[in-house]
Structures are given as structure tokens and as C-alpha cells.
Image (spheres, coloured by chain):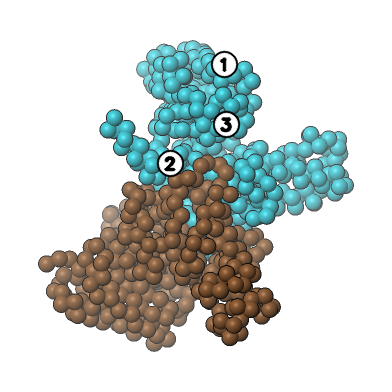
Chain colours: A brown, B cyan
Amino acid sequence: MSPLFAGVDLGGTSIKAAIAGSDAVFLMSRSIPTEAHRGPHDVIERIGSLVEDLVDKSRADPSALQSVGIGVPGLIDVSEGLTKFLPNFPTQWRDLPVASLLQQRLGVPIRLLNDVRTATLGELRFGHGRTTPQPTMAFFSIGTGVGGGLALQGKLWLGPLGAAGELGHQTIRPDGPHCGCGNRGCLEAIASGTAIAAEGVRLMKSGLAPALHERVEGSADRVTVREMAAIADQDLRIKESLVDAGKAIGIAAANVVTILHPDLVVLGGGVAEIGPLLVDTVRQVIRDRVGMFPTDNVRVERSLLGDQAGLKGALALAVEPVELSGSDAVMTTREKRHR
Amino acid sequence: MSPLFAGVDLGGTSIKAAIAGSDAVFLMSRSIPTEAHRGPHDVIERIGSLVEDLVDKSRADPSALQSVGIGVPGLIDVSEGLTKFLPNFPTQWRDLPVASLLQQRLGVPIRLLNDVRTATLGELRFGHGRTTPQPTMAFFSIGTGVGGGLALQGKLWLGPLGAAGELGHQTIRPDGPHCGCGNRGCLEAIASGTAIAAEGVRLMKSGLAPALHERVEGSADRVTVREMAAIADQDLRIKESLVDAGKAIGIAAANVVTILHPDLVVLGGGVAEIGPLLVDTVRQVIRDRVGMFPTDNVRVERSLLGDQAGLKGALALAVEPVELSGSDAVMTTREKRHR
């Protein structure tokens, strides 16, 4: 009987789940609406049913299921398996023992991790991280917001709270736009899909993006990074705005390179679908701005896993436990050992 | 016979050296002028004599000397013990096998490391790092330039070239002033002693700093951060300029906190002598700008070792070898094992 693992990617709009062996090749996968308004216990119950159902449909022996990894969009307590603060979920999720509730439901160990750290683990084990031995990798997830994750010498770097690696909340412009996190001028406030699309709308409404206007019939609601990328060769101001976002991402990446000198910088999330324009801009900014040492060996790549990074990472999390880093984590581990 | 170690801090103007046991408590120390114009072989010869002389004067058995650690101001090849690029030294230092030349001279292993990484090691082993088990620490050395170093879970993080941790070359203002490294808007270009003093001179020459003018008798050459700090309560524009520098350092520190969630941020170098005004500003900026997780446990402190951090670190380097990080380093180590 081959061991079976489940991965879950809990999002504000949908819950995705997959089951697989330790190679993370999906045997079955499915997505259901989150419907967070129905309350956390309802959501957790449906995650449990979804996993059970996938195991059932795969015709695997139910007892083959070893563990479940779950990527969660927010701050969580990794050691205790609690959700601490999920920005897009009701407040009942504060200090909710999601891991133990689901463990009671499914009878196997449940591991929780922030969703972008989970995607980082996916990219590390099953994406670009696989081609370099023990890679040091910075992962940017550029979507509605900008999340991040770090792997140092082949190991996820989580910090004492599982919250390290927030590459999207570096200050890029000290007096820049306000960010949802409370800071000003974060990368997220400048180069998230939300920020890029807002600039696209502004350009369109200012009459500087006729091709975009035609494409979305003047509807601000329909302006997305994907639509902007599609007409970038016609509306040069749109192209500039995409390059400007790439430059901001490049500055954040150059800072991480200057600080950590990683082997790999990986760009994931929906905005990465802009493609070469983004990746080339980020590469150029790193060349231009990192002057303290040669960066020829720092690879900058678009995620190999695309929108599967989160689920693949959740499966990797099910396969292998992760460790917090920092002295608090060391002490927590020690305390636990003495219990 | 107690083992004896030597630490050397090679600077553009002076060479400092100390000998000590493994506790890095100086038995003897001395400083001599560098006189780099006399050429690298002369400098290396005088480093050798200086170490020999200190051992001799200490009346220790010369055979007690185990190894020498040297902090070098620039890019070096840690594995091979070569100097690669020293900005303030003649070009003859390019690819110079300093470690093997000194090893021939002194007959003991010689270890080379960038001077700020060396100071980071000093702070880690003998400064604030000592009070936290396996600390993750960011060290800023704010002097003529702004250098940096990182320790992750008690271990120096060097990257594949020994060049990681350049915290002073994060971009703080994308369109900011040109930096010696080729980038624009680096922390170093905004908040080094050089940059702060230049702003002091500008304020003085603009008639906005009468107390400073009186103190240095109107001489731009005499304007230093120390002089500015001394009259900061009289010249409010000078005080503002020091706070502005602190804010820039705070942004760089907040970025590192957001990325790595360290236990400790340590401010060293001459500019750190501004004292509470600087440390308090950096603490405040971290509180204001890190919004993704609580930072109550991140300590921000002024270096405990002050201008001894470099020598203490060089002694620590003599006591313990350091390892490069990143996959290149892993491969290099492997290759060496197979030789």
C-alpha cells in the first residue's frame, strides 16, 4: 500500500485540494467555493469531506492517507496549528485550532502553513528548486497582493512565527502609497495585481490607453493585468506601467539578492503571467542595482508550477514537517521536548 | 599551554591586531599605519611582524599560536583566502593569495573574511549575540560607508562568495543619490557618516546650523557625525538630519525584519555613537513599517563591542572556521572532498 497525502489550498473564494503520493503528482484534485460566511466550522467540515471524497474517488485504501498539509492565507501559529489572523476571513478564525479540529475529523496529522510559504515549499521541492542542490531561493507570489517566501540551503525559512519571508512588504518608496499592512510604499502597494490594474484604469480613463479601452469596453471592472499585458504592444503607456511594476519588483528582488545572495529568485502568482517582460525587467534591475558582488549565478525565473505551486506545496508539507527558525523556535522545540 | 589566537583588522588607514585566548579577551593589542602605497607584500610582511611581536611581548610560547583571523575591507575569496577587490587599496591586491603568503610567514592557518562580516561574527560571539541562544541577527556597520552582516540561527550567513549581508546597499530611494557601488539610493548613499556629514555641511553653509558653524569654526572638513550629534539640541535642522538618517536606517532594518524576522538588529560603526536618538528612531520605524507580524521580540541595540567588534570578530574567526552558504559552497566543499 503506497502512502497517500492530501494537500489543501484554502483561499478567500475557493478551496482547492489534491491527493498524491510523495511525488506530489495529483491522483485526484478538486476545487469548491469557500463560502467563508458560513463560518469556520462549516468550512473545516467541508475541507474534511473534500479530502475524504478525493481519497474515496481515487479508490485508494482510506487508511493509506498519512497526513494533510494546508496552505492558509494569513498569519498562523505553525507549532500549534492555529489560525491567528486571516485578513479575508471572519474574525471567528482568530486562534482557531484548525489542525486539531481537522485531525479529529480525518484521524491523521494536519499541518498548517501560510499559503505563500506553502507555495514556496512547492517551488522548492517540485519546481525550480529541484534543479539546484540545497538551493537558497526567494519566491515572490505576485497576485491580488504580493506574498513571499524564503528557502535557505534547501530549507524553508519561517522565522519564529512562520511569518518571515514577507518579500512583498519591503518598503520600496518611503513616501509611497498606503498598503493594507499599515505601511507606506510597500512593494504590494506598488506592484500587486490590484495596484497595476488601478494604474491601468487610470491610464484608460485619462485617454492614454485606447486599445485597453476598446478591449474591456471602457469597464474599469474588467481591467486586469492579463488584459493589460494583452494590449501592451499597442498602448505604450500600459507597457510602461507594466515595466514600472517590474522595476519595483526588481528593486525588491535586488534587495533580497544584496542581503542573502540566493541561487534563485522565482516569480509566481498571476502577475508573473506577464511573462518575459516582467522576468527580463527584474533581471535587468538586479544587474543594475546589485553592485557589491557578481550576480551571474543568481537565476531569475518564472514559477515552474504556476497556480499549482500552492497545492504542490501543501502536499510537500503533508510529506515533510517544517521547522520554525529563530531562537524562539529553538526554545519552543526544547520546551516541548521536556514536556 | 593555553592556545593563543591572533585577530587582525586591516583598514585603509590602520592595521589593528590583538592576541587572545579563545575568550577573545585581548592579552596584547596594537595599531600601526597601513601605508598601503608601499604595496601588498610590504603590508603583509608588517602584519606578520606585528603578530609575531605581540606574541613575543605577551611572553606566550610562540608555538601556542594556533591561527590568525583577518578582517579585510572588500570582496574576498573565502575558500581560497584571496583578496578579490578592495576599494581603498591598490589594484595589486586583486587575486592576491594573502592567506597563503601569511601562512608561509607565520606557519599557522590564516583565515580571511570581509571586515563587516568579521565584525558581525564578533558581535555574534562576544556582543549582543551572546545573550540569545542561536540568534538570528542583522548587523549594520554605519561608518564612512554602511556595511552589514547576517547571522542565522547562530551561524554567520555568507552566501556563496562570502558577500551576502550587504545591508547597506539596499535601495531605500529608487531615484536617490548615486552610491559608490554603482546603484542609486542605497542606504549607504543616504545614511553613511559621509552622507550625513555632507548634509551637515550643506545646512551649515546655508546658515541653518549656527551652533555647528561655531563649533567647527565654519570648516567643512571638521564636520563629522560626532560634531553634529554634539550640537543637535541647539541646531534643530541638524537634529532633523540625524533623525532622517535614522529613518533611512530604520527602513533598511524594517526590510530585513520583514524578510527574515530576526531576534536582533545591532547597530555598529561610528555613526551608531549618535546613541539613543538613532536607536530609538530605528525602533520606531520598525514598529511603524512592519505590519505583517508582531515585532515585540525583535531587539534593536547599539553594538556592545563598539570599535572592537572587528578585532573580536577576527579572533572569533581565528578560533572557528566559517562556512560559505548557498549551493555553490556546498559544491565547492564537495569538490574539495573529492580532490
Tell which circle, 2 or 1, labels the residue nearer the N-terminal end. Answer: 1
> Where is B60 relative to A242, above or below?
above
In terms of secondary structure, where does tag 1 sit? helix
The answer to whether the residues at label 2 and label 1 have Cβ atoms under 8 Å apart is no
* Type of the residue with mark 2: Pro
* Type of the residue with mark 1: Asp
The answer to whether the residues at label 3 and label 1 have Cβ atoms under 8 Å apart is no
Tell which circle, 2 or 3, labels the residue nearer the N-terminal end. Answer: 3
Residue B115 in view, yes or no: no
In terms of secondary structure, where does tag 3 sit? loop
Q: Where does residue A253 sit, x and y in percent of width and height? A: 52, 55
- Give the Cα separation between the discs numbered 3 and 1: 16 Å
Which quadrant holds residue B14? top right
In front of the other: A278 or A326: A278
- The chain to which mark 1 is attached is B
Residue highlighted by disc 1 = B42
Residue highlighted by disc 2 = B160
Residue highlighted by disc 3 = B86
- Give the Cα separation between the discs numbered 2 and 1: 30 Å
> Where is B21 relative to A51, above or below?
above
Q: Is residue A238 left or right of residue A145?
A: right
> Where is B50 relative to B126, above or below?
above
- Give the Cα separation between the discs numbered 2 and 3: 18 Å
Report the residue at 55% width, 32% height from top.
Answer: B85
Does label 1 lie on the same chain as label 3?
yes
Does label 3 lie on the same chain as label 2?
yes
On the rendered image, what quadrant is the N terminus of chain A found in? Answer: bottom left
Q: Residue A151 has which mark?
A: none
